[in-house]
Amino acid sequence: MQRLLILLPPLGWLLLLVAAPLLILGLIAFAEAGPGVPPFIPPLGWAGGPVWQGSTESFGTLLADPYYLEAFLRSLFTAFVTAALCLLLAYPMALGIAGARPSWRLPLLLLVLLPFWTGFLPRLGAWIGLLRDGGWVNGVLGLAGVGPLRLLYSDLALHLGMVHAYLPFAVLPLATTLLRRDRSLEEAAADLGATPFTVFRSVTLPLSLPAAASAFLLVFIPAAGEFVIPELLGPPEAQMVGRVLWGEFFQNRDWPLAAALALALLVLLLPSILFFQRLGRRG
């Protein structure tokens, strides 16, 4: 009984903020678009009790129209590239933090977290100022006799903004694991004549692979549904799922199709989420 009382608050919280919104989203996805507020016909009618009147038209549209398939593929590809770049940058940063003096580790970790202490939109605004045609980057390139180049509203700007936003999510789990690793294994490998690269490849990397997988998924999962960065920095043709969903919800006011898009994205990301939870259970 006491254990049940302890579990009731978190269970209630999950039911209220996770299960209930998903249920509402599912009901909207099986509704029919129509005039009114809200702009859909509920899939449940009442004739002495709930009568199912749902429609699968929204899911049929997703499967039949290649526009939505391309949006999903582009979102997953962009998220994969972002996660891979973040992982490549996070490894040397995490190794540097783990190898620093104990008195320097906390300040270095705070520097990694520093971008979170500022507004998200001002940081994207800074990238717009740097990458626009008359911005600082093109100004420096002009001094070198190059340009001006079209940097803003390009795939380059999109990936720069994505990596800048999600890099801390990759650094923190790697740094935590590398700080706790057994240094004696690396020292033994070095004493046996292994080069620093061989030590990293044969000892450090295998020990940190679970953390690397967690870091990759921590970036990949939210990046797949990103809306703000592609909207402000990406090319107009970069129709990722977040932008498409926003357009269906606010511009076309097709709430059932927008809900179906959200559920389809959740289903696509579900294996990654389950794998991330499995890594968490393994410690």
Image: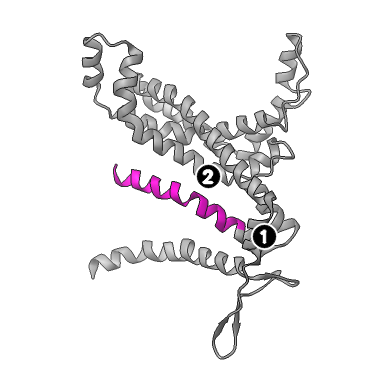
Main secondary structure of the magenta stretch: helix
Q: Is residue 135 left or right of residue 104?
A: right
Q: Could you classify mark 2 by the number of other residues whose Cα lies within 10 Å: few (under 14), some (14-19), or many (20 or more)?
A: few
Q: Position of residue 191 (x, y in %)?
A: 22, 10
Report the residue that reaches farthest toward the front. 64
Q: Dot 1: what SS?
A: helix
Q: Position of residue 243 (x, y in %)?
A: 67, 48
Nearer the camera: disc 2 or disc 1: 1
**Residues shaded magenta:** 261-283
Rendering quarter of residue 153? top right
Question: Which quarter of the rendered picture does the N terminus lie within?
Answer: bottom left
Q: Position of residue 8 (x, y in %)?
A: 34, 66
Q: Dot 2: what SS?
A: helix
Label 2 to label 1: alpha-carbon separation: 25 Å
Q: Nearer the viewer, residue 144 or 279?
A: 279
Q: Is residue 253 above or below residue 38?
A: above
Is-magenta flag for residue 258?
A: no
The residue identified by callout 2 is 222
Q: Is residue 21 above or below residue 174?
A: below
Question: Which quarter of the rendered picture does the C terminus lie within?
Answer: top left
Q: Nearer the viewer, residue 91 or 139?
A: 91
Residue at the (74%, 72%) spot, across then down: 36
Residue at the (60%, 65%) spot, across then down: 29
- Tell which circle, 2 or 1, labels the residue nearer the N-terminal end: 1
Residue at the (48%, 25%) spot, across then down: 89
Q: How many marks?
A: 2
Report the residue that reaches farthest toward the bottom. 48
The residue identified by callout 1 is 61
Amino acid type, residue under disc 2 in the picture: Pro
Check residue 41 in the rendering and tell me which mark sits there, or answer none: none
